[in-house]
Amino acid sequence: MTLEDLERYAAAWNAHDIDTIMSYMTDDCVFETGGGARYEGFEVVKARFIEVWTEIPDVSFNNGQHFLQGNRGCSEWTLCGTRKDGSKINVDGCDLFVFAGDNNSKIQLKNSYLKSS
């Protein structure tokens, strides 16, 4: 995984491009949400990612900053959007990643944290 990969991954989230997002995930990937839920496996994680756009149709992740160290990484961001009920969301957060595969090229764990919601 490179910083450029993390930038492309973040851009795919903002483009709501599930195929590109999932191209960065391992088959046995895990997604842990800021609310404490855990999703395991490629198809389960993919379905949950798609739900994010259902819950916050205009979601975007702004002000991205990315860091790498060995098989771990971090992306800081500000999540912005409008929930289905019309309420606005603007919250800082981060993803902590664990990478796996050849040259740690894929995301095995995406662990999200939010400052508030």
Image (spheres, rainbow, N blue to C red):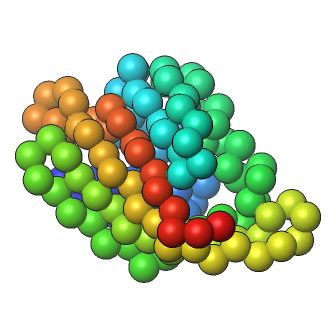
Against 20, residue 61 (above or below) is: below
Res 109 quadrant in image: top left
Is 98 on the left or on the right of 79, as rendered? left
> Where is residue 73 shown, x and y percent of the image?
23, 52
The extreme right residue here reads 85
Rendered-image quadrant of the C terminus: bottom right
**Residue 16: image x %, image y %?**
60, 54
**Which residue lies at the image location 38% right of the left edge and 72% below the top edge?**
64
Q: Is residue 20 among the parts visible in the rendering?
A: no
User: Residue at (9%, 46%) from the top-left corner?
Assistant: 70
The foreground one among 116 and 51 is: 116
Say whether residue 82 is left or right of residue 69: right
Front residue (pair 68, 4): 68
Q: Nearer the viewer, residue 9 or 91?
A: 91
Q: Is residue 84 left or right of residue 96?
A: right
Residue 107 spot, x, y in % from top left: 32, 38
Q: Is 51 on the left-hand or right-hand side of 33?
A: right
Q: Is residue 67 visible?
A: yes
Image height of 6 relative to 101, above or below: below
